[in-house]
Image (tube, rainbow, N blue to C red):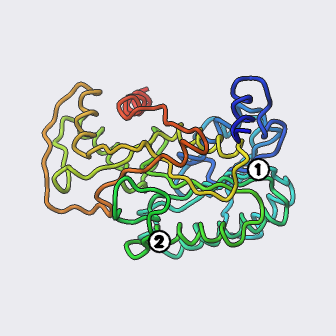
């Protein structure tokens, strides 16, 4: 039987979701990805949704944190006693582990990054084992691959850990799942995730607010390099949908790339945003290019085959949503 049969029945209205009337824990649930997962979770009527977020790179402005079903705790996942309180008092059935230091913050605050991304993940896995959690969905990153040796990058691509701290903290966290997690789990290696809820610290997609503000103010856009650097852009709503597909499936112990499978040049991104805003500015190119990975394009064959996942939001449509949300 197709492993997605249960999920397809659930989305078609013929069956309940696995999380209906269950307790769900979302770490990093006030952030860009976690808040979009919260949207999807609440649609399935859990009995309680616990959101843990230390608000280092997010805030409580997201209105659904005030939902009657949601209980919010500004806690630090690297502190075992704080996480023990959550697991012992709420006994979550399912966990979406999204909490993480982002790339730029990891470079400037390496100790905090190690504590959050590695020790925090160990705490979540260890407590999930002890409290018999039914399944964990873990948010990893395509940064585990470093600079690609080939494109598109599939899940068998070698890891590279020499370039920057964030990447090797994610590699180590993945090893914790593979070596220590005794409950069902799936992991996701995200590419360049964006939405109107993203915050500073997202190294690659930080160009979104920069481009928007420059265009609106009629100022020149500066691109470091020749503009041929590429991102594999995927909207956070699609990321959340991939998480739900993994949770509802019977698949366990697998990592999946989550991207669009296509490349968008930085210069192209600027042009699209100018089209959407309907205002032209000059683009100035400078030689200094600080991007850690020059080109990104994921192979999406595995997630398409095993989870039947295909992104729905095209880059132009996603950028239009981004601009519309800012201008509300």
Q: Which element type, helix, strand or loop, lies under badge 1?
A: strand
Q: Residue drawn at (61%, 56%), measured in percent from left and top?
A: 187
**Residue 48 at x, y percent in the picture:** 80, 42
Instruction: Answer with the quarter of the image where residue 209 lies.
Output: top left
Q: Is residue 182 left or right of residue 144?
A: right
Seen in the picture, residue 16 relative to 87 is either above or below; the reply is above
Q: Residue drawn at (29%, 27%), measured in percent from left and top?
A: 276
**Residue 233 at x, y percent in the picture:** 40, 44
Q: Is residue 190 left or right of residue 208?
A: right
Q: Residue drawn at (50%, 48%), measured in percent from left and top?
A: 258
Q: Quadrant of the C terminus?
A: top left
The mark found on residue 94 in the picture is 1
Instruction: Answer with the quarter of the image where residue 174 lies.
Output: bottom right
How many badges with numbers are in the image? 2
Separation of marks 1 and 2 at Cα, in angstroms: 30 Å
Along the polypeptide, which appears first: circle 1 or circle 2? 1
Seen in the picture, residue 131 relative to 269 is either above or below; the reply is below
Q: Are marks 1 and 2 in contact (CB under 8 Å)?
A: no
Q: Quadrant of the N terminus?
A: top right
Closer to the camera, 323 or 73?
323
Q: Which element type, helix, strand or loop, lies under badge 2?
A: loop
* Front disc: 1 or 2: 1
**Residue 315 at x, y percent in the picture:** 37, 35
**Residue 217 at x, y percent in the picture:** 23, 36
**Residue beneath disc 2:** 109
Seen in the picture, residue 265 relative to 129 is either above or below; the reply is above
Q: Residue drawn at (44%, 68%), measured in percent from left and top?
A: 158
Seen in the picture, residue 73 relative to 168 is either above or below; the reply is above
């Amino acid at each position: 039987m197709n492993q997605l049969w249960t999920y397809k029945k659930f989305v078609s209205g013929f069956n309940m979701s696995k999380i209906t009337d269950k307790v769900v824990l979302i770490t990093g649930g006030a952030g860009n990805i976690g808040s979009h997962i919260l949207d999807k979770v609440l649609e399935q009527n859990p009995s309680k949704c616990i959101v843990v977020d230390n608000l280092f790179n997010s805030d409580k402005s997201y209105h659904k944190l005030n939902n009657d079903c949601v209980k919010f705790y500004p806690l630090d996942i690297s502190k075992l006693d704080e996480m023990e309180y959550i697991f012992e008092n709420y006994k979550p059935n399912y966990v979406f582990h999204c909490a993480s230091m982002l790339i730029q913050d990891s470079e400037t605050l390496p100790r905090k990054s190690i504590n959050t991304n590695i020790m925090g993940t160990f705490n979540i896995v260890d407590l999930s084992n002890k409290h018999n959690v039914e399944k964990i969905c873990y948010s990893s990153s395509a940064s585990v691959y470093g600079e690609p040796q080939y494109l598109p990058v599939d899940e068998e691509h070698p890891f590279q850990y020499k370039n920057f701290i964030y990447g090797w903290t994610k590699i180590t966290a993945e090893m914790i799942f593979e070596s220590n997690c005794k409950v069902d789990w799936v992991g996701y290696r995200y590419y360049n995730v964006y939405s109107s809820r993203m915050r500073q610290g997202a190294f690659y997609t930080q160009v979104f607010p920069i481009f928007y503000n420059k265009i609106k103010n009629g100022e020149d856009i500066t691109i470091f390099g020749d503009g041929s650097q590429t991102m594999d852009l995927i909207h956070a709503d699609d990321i959340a949908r991939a998480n739900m597909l993994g949770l509802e499936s019977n698949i366990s112990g697998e990592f999946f790339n989550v991207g669009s499978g296509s490349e968008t040049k930085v210069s192209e991104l600027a042009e699209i945003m100018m089209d959407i805003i309907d205002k032209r500015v000059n683009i100035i190119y400078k030689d200094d290019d600080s991007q850690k990975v020059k080109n990104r394009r994921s192979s999406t064959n595995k997630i398409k085959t095993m989870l039947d996942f295909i992104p729905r939001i095209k880059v132009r449509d996603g950028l239009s949503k981004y601009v519309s949300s800012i201008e509300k």
